[in-house]
Image: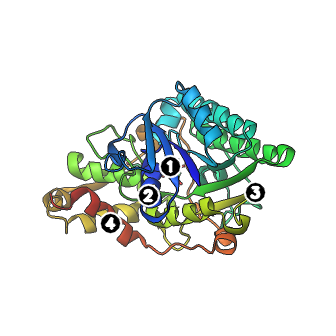
Amino acid sequence: MKVLTLGINGFIGSTLTEKILKDTDWRLFGMDLNSDWIKGHTSHPRLTFQEGDITICKEWIEYHVKKCDVVLPLVAIATPATYVSDPLRVFDLDFAANLEIIKMVVKYKKRIIFPSTSEVYGMCQDSEFKEEGSNLTVGPINKQRWIYSCCKQLLDRVIYAYGIRDGLDYTLFRPFNWIGPRLDSIGKQKEGGSRVLSQFISNILYAGEIKLVDGGKQRRCFTYIDDGICALMKIIENKDDCAKGKIFNIGNPNEEHSIAELAERLLEAAVSVPYLKDRASKTKIVSVPSNDYYGGSYQDTCHRVPSIDNAKRYLNWQPKTGLSEAIKHTLDFYFAGK
Ligand code: UGA
């Protein structure tokens, strides 16, 4: 199988690359702006890496869409602070650039595996979000946070419509707060510059203060990256067409925790890491209003639990890793040997 991954150096792309090169005989082609997370693999005989911007290197992409069997367009801005600070950048990259790629996949009749998102459910009130049954509920236009959700939702609908009209072979997968090594870089950065676990780790490192937005009562189901990648591998393998034309929530419904609990668990784990011990024991947890942290065009969802019935039934998949273990693996990755 020939696999094309755009955004191969990202959180999902880099972990997937490692897994594909280790466990399969597939040929992998990938593009990214950077290669720091895959630098150990760029000279692998089954990987062709091209440094480049997907909005510019269109010929390279078209050539490789034509050449490959399956395409994973993983490039997207996925940090809520950017949804509110630069919504048009999110639109241009997450929506417009990816739409062009989807159209190439349709043109060459290839298979697409597209990263939708838990964010498409928005503020849905269902106790568990179902791919085929739950409403996708977002706030008013002045709440710009939802631009990411809407971009992804519209692409989901476009792909689905191509499936019906042109027989596009697709799978949509919806990660629910995947966490783990390489989620984001944990260098010194501005508040909100990365997703919550990486943000809190850099807060311990550089700020001595973890900020809980609106008190941190909002809940998420944290899913360890290796569990997510295991589901994604089954989707790519597509044994007996088990993933064809389907949408999968990929999340861990057993690991629903408030953001305040995440902060506490992280601090508990961080005091056992020598490099972090002193900083973690001095780090305070404080509450800040969302208006101060993200600005007025932010709106949040207070709970987000996936139904994973589809993934269990069609992929024979379920998550194995709990939050504490996921935090431990993440800290080991960044700080082992420091
Ligand atoms: C995320 C992002 O939109 C995407 O990465 C992704 O598509 C999706 O959800 C997912 O991973 O399932 P969200 O869960 O809101 O959205 O993103 P985080 O930045 O990880 O924040 C989680 C929660 O922590 C939010 O309620 C946020 O307000 C809170 N938070 C964040 C804090 O309390 N303090 C911080 O310093 C940062």
Mark closer to the chain start, 4 or 1 = 1
Vertical placement of residue 312 versus 156, above or below: below
Spot occupied by residue 151 in the image (x, y as percentages of width and height) = 65, 38
In the rendered structure, find residue 28 and report the number of the disc placed on it: 1
In the rendered structure, find residue 136 and report the number of the disc placed on it: none
Q: Point out the frontmost of discs 4 and 1.
A: 1
- Which residue is the site of mark 4? 329
In the rendered structure, find residue 245 and report the number of the disc placed on it: 3
Which residue is found at the position 66% from the left and 48% from the top? 112
Q: Quadrant of residue 232?
A: bottom right
Spot occupied by residue 34 in the image (x, y as percentages of width and height) = 38, 37
Spot occupied by residue 26 in the image (x, y as percentages of width and height) = 52, 56
**Type of amino acid under label 2:** Leu
In whole angstroms, how far apart are the C-alphas of marks 4 and 1?
26 Å
Which residue is found at the position 35% from the left and 46% from the top? 43
- Where disc 4 sits, the SS reads helix
- Identify the residue at the far front of this view: 45
- Which residue is the site of mark 2? 21
Mark closer to the chain start, 2 or 1 = 2
In whole angstroms, how far apart are the C-alphas of marks 3 and 1?
23 Å
